[in-house]
Image: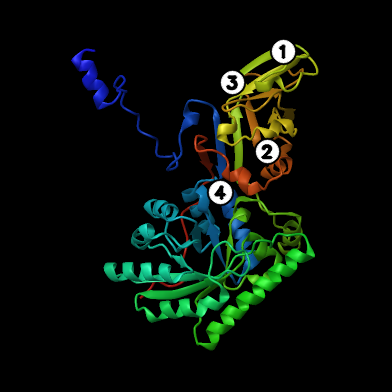
């Protein structure tokens, strides 16, 4: 082997020098692969719908304030743009699951309180402090870590304590809350700002589910009363998610945390019925539509079996359209076997074969008007027809949350109807 070749192998395999990457346009959201600049598939995000939904929910729960949950890339809608749209509609704070999610918001000039919904690890405490995120804690170790960071930085921070009233995922047992609160109150650099809990079955249809949520509220009220007897009164008390805020008015306290409702969906028939009664004729609007364009059209004979597995024969001579989006983008394979449709030309069209990684095939039957370049709607409205995330969820035995969050990162989010920036604060700044 020539010496030069051996040296290159030792240094690592290197191919041809790539061309200089083009500058990413400023309208591309942070962290989104811009695959649709080389293929026609995208998710369209109507920010006016998020603003509208936030306004409707804010009015419904007042005098409680609205905290917009924008974790998981804003439920697949884009966290930064969803946060701004929600605050334009009246949300006075935001909530995320991860420190990195809060950092992304701050780095994109999103202001106002940002609540962390879980106790972060020790390696993320400094970042949470540096970016003025409001931590949730539920262990003595978590409090000690933030106390140490506050001393080292010379920085005071507000803290919320989460109470486990029955979901049994994370949170402090009600009996442990007084000691945790005492540790916060006694530390001069930690401010006990909030107490909260979470409901696992506020969207449930059964009497048992409703009774369970009522018992959770009783436990939570007991924890609040125990603190009041010690003359400790948190500024912010919150328990309700979207379902809880709508079905259980007594759970609104001073603030509610709405996630799925912001994006235009309600979790179940019970919540939908309660919303219809309480909302005074207002409706929520789905904010996300999933769209693509036909890239290929061919006419196939009756009996042909398109796609992997050759799962189903065409019932007649049919026009079959290929669309460049697949299960790698969040279009589940099971949609084919469960009878899903897409919209082309304002008409529902069944899938012609199994969903593949990058493409789907659509049975347009005898419609020869379908041509490359035609818009395809997988989720959303076209003409008088609409396909929703709830429809997909019903076919797949899951929930709309999973459908929305499952739309992959190589599907760019194209933002329309962006609001003017606005917002506020849940509580005054720490003195």
Q: How far apart are marks 3 and 2 (CA)?
A: 20 Å
First-in-chain label (1 vs 2): 1
Task: State the image coordinates of residue 300 (x, y, percent, origin top left).
Answer: 72, 13
Q: Distance between the residues labelled 3 and 1?
A: 16 Å
- Residue 100 — which label? none
Q: Distance between the residues labelled 4 and 1?
A: 39 Å
Image depth: mark 3 or mark 4 in front: 4
Say which residue label 2 marks. Answer: 381
Q: Distance between the residues labelled 4 and 2?
A: 20 Å
Q: Residues within 10 Å of mark 1 (few under 14, many from 20)?
A: some
Which residue sits at x=62%, y=46%? 402
Is residue 286 placed above or below 422 in the rendered structure?
Answer: above
Relative to 152, is 388 on the left or the right? right
Helix or strand or loop: what does disc 4 sit on?
helix
First-in-chain label (4 vs 2): 4
Say which residue label 4 marks. Answer: 75
Q: Are marks 3 and 4 in contact (CB under 8 Å)?
A: no
Which residue sits at x=21%, y=12%? 2
Say which residue label 3 marks. Answer: 295
First-in-chain label (4 vs 1): 4
């Amino acid at each position: 082997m020539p010496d030069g070749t051996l040296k290159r192998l030792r240094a690592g395999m290197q191919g041809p020098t790539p061309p200089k990457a083009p500058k990413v346009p400023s309208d591309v959201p942070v962290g989104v692969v811009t695959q649709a600049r080389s293929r026609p598939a995208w998710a369209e995000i109507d920010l006016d719908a998020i603003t509208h939904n936030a306004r409707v929910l804010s009015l419904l729960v007042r005098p409680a304030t609205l905290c917009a949950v924008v974790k998981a890339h804003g439920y697949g809608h884009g966290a930064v743009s969803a946060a701004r749209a929600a605050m334009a509609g009246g949300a006075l704070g935001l909530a995320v699951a991860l420190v990195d999610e809060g950092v992304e918001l701050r780095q994109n000039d999103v202001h106002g309180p940002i609540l962390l919904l879980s106790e972060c690890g020790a390696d993320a405490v400094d970042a949470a402090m540096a970016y003025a995120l409001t931590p949730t804690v539920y262990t003595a170790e978590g409090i000690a870590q933030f106390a140490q960071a506050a001393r080292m930085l010379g920085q005071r921070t507000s803290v919320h304590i989460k109470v486990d009233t029955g979901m049994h995922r994370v949170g402090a047992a009600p009996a442990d809350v007084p000691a945790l609160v005492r540790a916060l109150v006694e530390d001069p650099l930690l401010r006990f700002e909030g107490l909260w809990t979470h409901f696992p079955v506020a969207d449930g249809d059964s009497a048992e589910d409703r009774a369970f949520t009522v018992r959770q509220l009783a436990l939570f009220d007991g924890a609040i009363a125990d603190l009041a007897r010690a003359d400790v009164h948190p500024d912010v008390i919150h328990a309700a998610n979207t379902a809880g805020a709508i079905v259980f008015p007594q759970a609104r306290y001073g603030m509610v945390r709405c996630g799925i409702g912001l994006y235009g969906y309600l979790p179940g028939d019970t919540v939908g019925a309660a919303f219809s009664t309480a909302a005074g004729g207002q409706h929520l609007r789905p904010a996300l539509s999933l769209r693509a364009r036909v890239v290929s059209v061919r006419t196939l004979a009756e009996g042909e079996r398109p796609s992997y597995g050759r799962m189903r024969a065409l019932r007649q001579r049919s026009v079959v359209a290929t669309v460049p989006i697949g299960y790698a983008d969040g279009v589940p394979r099971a949609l084919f076997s469960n009878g899903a449709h897409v919209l082309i030309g304002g008409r529902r069209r069944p899938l012609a074969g199994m969903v593949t990684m990058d493409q789907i095939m659509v049975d347009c039957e005898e419609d020869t008007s379908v041509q490359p370049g035609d818009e395809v709607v997988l989720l959303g409205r076209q003409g008088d027809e609409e396909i929703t995330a709830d429809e997909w969820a019903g076919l797949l035995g899951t929930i709309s949350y999973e459908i929305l969050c499952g739309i992959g990162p190589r599907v760019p989010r194209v933002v329309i109807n962006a609001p003017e920036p606005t917002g506020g604060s849940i509580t005054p700044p720490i003195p």
